[in-house]
Every structure is written in structure tokens, then in C-alpha cells.
Amino acid sequence: MTSPALPDVHAVHNAFITAAVARLRQQESRIHDCIRLLSEDQVWARGNENSNSVANLVLHLIGNLGQWVVAGVGGAPDHRDRDSEFQTLAGISREELSARLKARMDQVVDVIEKIPAYRLLEMVTPQGYSLPVMEVITHITEHFYHHGGQIMLLTKLYLNVDLAYYKHLASNNVNHTETIP
């Protein structure tokens, strides 16, 4: 019995980078959808003093992506003020939040897409954690989906709507056009 041929390292690298960017862009789009659907008051609403608003979560994602990817992997200076991401209670419009998220995501995608294969195992130290670049990308994608899910849940709670992101799967429709789950 012969072993299958090992895939080319560049093919694996390209597949990993392409998948990470697609996931991040998909969730970014969903977060923008939620921001558009909510009113200014709903974007800043907090269920209680121990909960975050949608706006706080967006500010947190912008800060996290900047620290972990733009600075941690890309080498830009890290000017993050994590506490302010959660302490800000108003003053930034929905449009500005979306614009800031888009600008940050454009920076992040630019950094990720320029990472050569040999750097995926390079150790970097964002936020005091020593990790290979590949794990940083995996972590920030997971983190982005975690808080994006919170934003979607808050949107559903505030508006009593089905965001319909998986409507194409109703009745076991396997002939949908989605390319990633």
C-alpha cells in the first residue's frame, strides 16, 4: 500500500489563507447587516452593567484585530486601548462603526494575504501570547465569529427577526449556492 502524495506546501498555505479571509469577510458582512438593521439606541443598548452593547463588541473586534494581526503579525505599532472598547457608552454612529470595521478588516486582509508560507510557523507575541502566525489567524477568526454571533443574537433579540443566513438549508436543500457554511 502506497501513501498518498503530500500536498505542496504552497497549496496548503494558499488554501489556509483563502479560507481564513473568506470566513472573516463572511462574518464581517453579517456584522454590517446587523448594524444596518439596528437603531442608534439599539446599537448602544446594554442589557445590564455586565453586558456589552453591539457597538462595544464592534469596537472590541476592531481593537483585537489591530493588536493581533495588524501589529502582532504585520509589525505596525500597537496603540490599542482595550478598556475604552468596553467603557465607551455612545458617541459613534452606526455608519462610523461600520466604516471603522471595514477599514480595519481591509488592513487585516491585506496583512493576512501577504503572509508567505514560511511565516505561518513564525512565532509572534500579540497581547503577550507567544504563538505561531497560523495560530494567530485561527484565533482571530474564532474570536471574530464568537463576538459576531453575540451581535447576531442581540440583533435577533432586539428586532425579533430571522437573519436568514441559513434559510437555503430549509428542507435539506443541498443545491444551494453558498460556498462556505
Image (cartoon, rainbow, N blue to C red):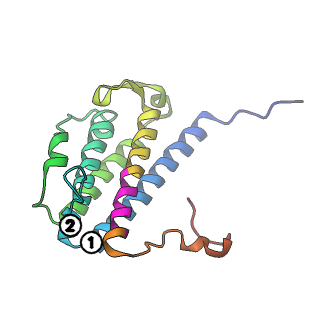
**Residue 144: image location, x then y, percent:** 38, 49
Residue 46 found in image quarter: bottom left
The segment highlighted magenta reads: 147-156
Give residue 73's position: percent from left, percent from top: 34, 34
Question: Residue at the location (33% across, 75% down)?
Answer: 159
Kindly identify which numbered label has been placed on residue 38: 1
Residue at 33% across / 39% down in the picture?
69
Residue 118 coordinates in the image, percent (x, y): 49, 28
146 sits to left or right of 57: right
**Residue 120's x, y, as percent?**
47, 31
Residue that mark 2 sits on = 94
- Observer-nearest of 49 and 144: 49
Of the residues shown, which amino acid type is indicated by label 1? Leu
Pick out the residue farthest to the right: 1
Q: Nearer the viewer, mark 1 or mark 2?
A: 1
Residue 151 falls inside the magenta stretch? yes
Mark 1 or mark 2, earlier in chain: 1
Residue 178 placement: quadrant: bottom right
